[in-house]
Image (cartoon, grey):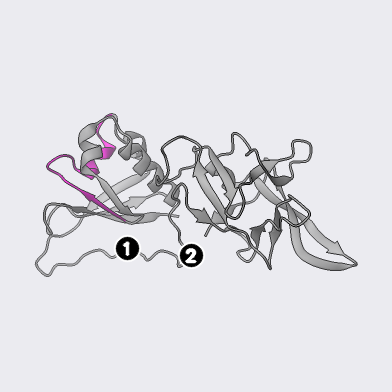
Amino acid sequence: MVFYAYVKQVTDNSTYRYVIVFASRAVADEWWRAVSTSSVVKFTESIRRVNAQFYTHDVNLANAANSLTTTGVATQFIGKVFFTLQYDLGGRILSIIPPLDKDFVDHISGNSFFIRSKASPKEYWYCPLQGTKSVYVSNTERTRFRVSRTSSSTAGTVMIGSDEIVLTLIAVNLSINVLPESGQVIVSNAPKTGLKFSDFLGKFSAGATMYKDGKSLGSRELFYMEDGEEWELV
């Protein structure tokens, strides 16, 4: 689904204001990664991310719209992003972008999140830590995890699908890992290596509902697999 943002000229209040249309929220974050890490210094100095839907730029250094056509910046997104120049001031209209979902969170490395099913938003990852190191999917309980990029000095940056990450419990120093024989997700002292942010889009899946004495426990074991489900951070 398309994602929108504004970009405003930082030196005045009337010129070079754009609405940016991204092919998806993921594309928006990937475009920002490309721009913010570009070797073309004038773009890294010009463009600032205020939040997920608001950027500023100084066109005296570089125009954000030109990031799509300047070699070494973000030319790979020319088919996934476009900029629309807005009217100046003087009583003329401004295009209003749709509001974000109430549960929207920015995917900032080092922040903590609950993790829930995209298809069944009442189901969350849950780690009871009482007699077990297993991670479950529950419709009655939930656990907060810290999600961080494994690369050094990346705290506070926006995570994208290709980033390798580690998921750590907030309460204790245990991280998400996977049993190699079964694919069951557990917490351990050693985090799973090679885990990527994009794995939330289809590498985790819940097993069958668990029962005790013939009664449903309202939870299912979590597994890591190739053909999984989609999960989101909230």
Query: Alpha-carbon neighbours of circle 1 within 10 Å: few (<14), some, or many (≥20)?
Result: some
Q: CA distance from mark 2 to mark 1?
A: 17 Å
* Mark 2 or 1: the one toward you: 2
Question: Disc 1 residue type?
Answer: Ile
- Magenta range is 54-71
In the figure, 178 relative to 140: above or below? above
Q: Residue at x 25, y 35 (%)?
A: 69
Q: Nearer the viewer, residue 88 or 142?
A: 142
Image side of residue 215 versus residue 232, left or right? right
- Disc 2 marks which residue? 103
Residue annotated with mark 1? 97
Quarter where residue 190 is shown? top right
- Residue in view at x 50 percent, y 44 percent: 148
Q: Please state which amino acid type lies under the numbered disc 2.
A: Asp
Residue 114 lies, in percent from the top left, at 57, 58
Residue 63 shown left or right of residue 29 in the figure: left
Quarter of the figure that contains the N terminus: bottom left
Tell me residue 173's x, y (percent).
Answer: 61, 47
Looking at the image, is 161 positioned above or below residue 72?
below
Q: What residue is rendered at 64% in x and 46% in y?
A: 174
Q: Residues within 10 Å of mark 2 (few under 14, many from 20)?
A: few
Q: In the shown orientation, is residue 232 left or right of residue 157?
A: right
- Is residue 56 within the magenta segment? yes
Q: Residue at point 32% right, 63% down?
A: 97
| Front in this rendered view, residue 84 or 152 | 152
Could you say where residue 39 lies in the image, as x and y percent from the top left? 28, 29
Under circle 2, the secondary element is loop
* Residue 48 image offset from top left, x and y in percent: 26, 47
Marks 2/1 in contact by CB < 8 Å: the verdict is no
Q: Which mark is residue 40?
A: none
Q: Secondary structure at mark 1?
A: loop
